[in-house]
Image (cartoon, rainbow, N blue to C red):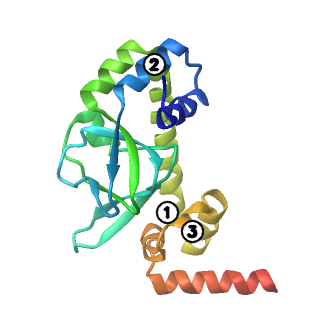
Amino acid sequence: MLDVHHIDLIETIKKEVPVTKLEASIIQSFFTEKKYKRGALLLQAGDVAHEVFFVVKGALRQFYVDEGGHERTCHFTFEKDFVTDLESFSQQIKSPSSIKTLVNTTCLCIRHDELKSLLNQSPAMAEFFRICIQGVAAKSMQRTKSLLYFSPEKQFIELLEERPEIFRRVPQHYIAQYLGVAPESLSRIKKRLMVQAKS
């Protein structure tokens, strides 16, 4: 019998690939539920990413620390989405990024060796994982293009249109980090756009 969190996991997978009852049972048996307090580090830069996290409740941010010791947020993850440092996880090398909770968070977790076993046992999960990898690559390319070609204001508008929940759930200074601007600059961008919207 699947609990509500594992149902969320299976339903998320089913959006991309068909899943039989047998495979659903196999898939859920590999995932372990873990709860994390606000501010908990799920992955520390310099460590190897041994787990993939499926968020059932909560919010996380992924970030790097630059040479000057400043944090640079690169990604936010909310409910019904997966997160890890993909390069570190897939190659089992040291992670360049950290993953930290923004609020109390509950995840379903699977370790690297367990996922390898699951992919061998479940064709549906193997296909889903392949689709996920493609999605991550496409999003990474889109993000790089935005950073290279778009002004912070254009990036702000794009983010607001595509992921409005970020503005409801993430502190402004982390959004500023993500856009590569100072918090004061983000405030000015928001004010300009509000003025434009009223005119």
Is 139 situated above or below 187? Answer: above
Is 23 situated above or below 143? Answer: above
Q: Earlier in the sequence, mark 3 or mark 2?
A: 2
Q: Which mark is residue 148?
A: 1
Quarter occupied by residue 34: top left
Residue type, mark 2 in image: Ser
Q: Is residue 42 left or right of residue 121?
A: left
- Give the secondary structure at mark 1: helix
For disc 2, the marked residue is: 25
* x and y, in percent, of residue 115 in the image: 33, 26
Q: Which mark is residue 56?
A: none
Q: Which mark is residue 167?
A: 3
Residue type, mark 3 in image: Phe
Q: Earlier in the sequence, mark 1 or mark 3?
A: 1
| Mark 3 burial class by Cα count in 10 Å: few <14, some 14-19, many 20+ | few
Q: Are marks 2 and 1 in contact (CB under 8 Å)?
A: no
Near-viewer residue (109 or 91)? 109
Q: Residue at x 58, y 23 (%)?
A: 17
| Mark 2 burial class by Cα count in 10 Å: few <14, some 14-19, many 20+ | some
Near-viewer residue (144 or 174)? 174
Quarter occupied by residue 30: top left
Query: In front of the other: label 1 or label 3?
Result: 3
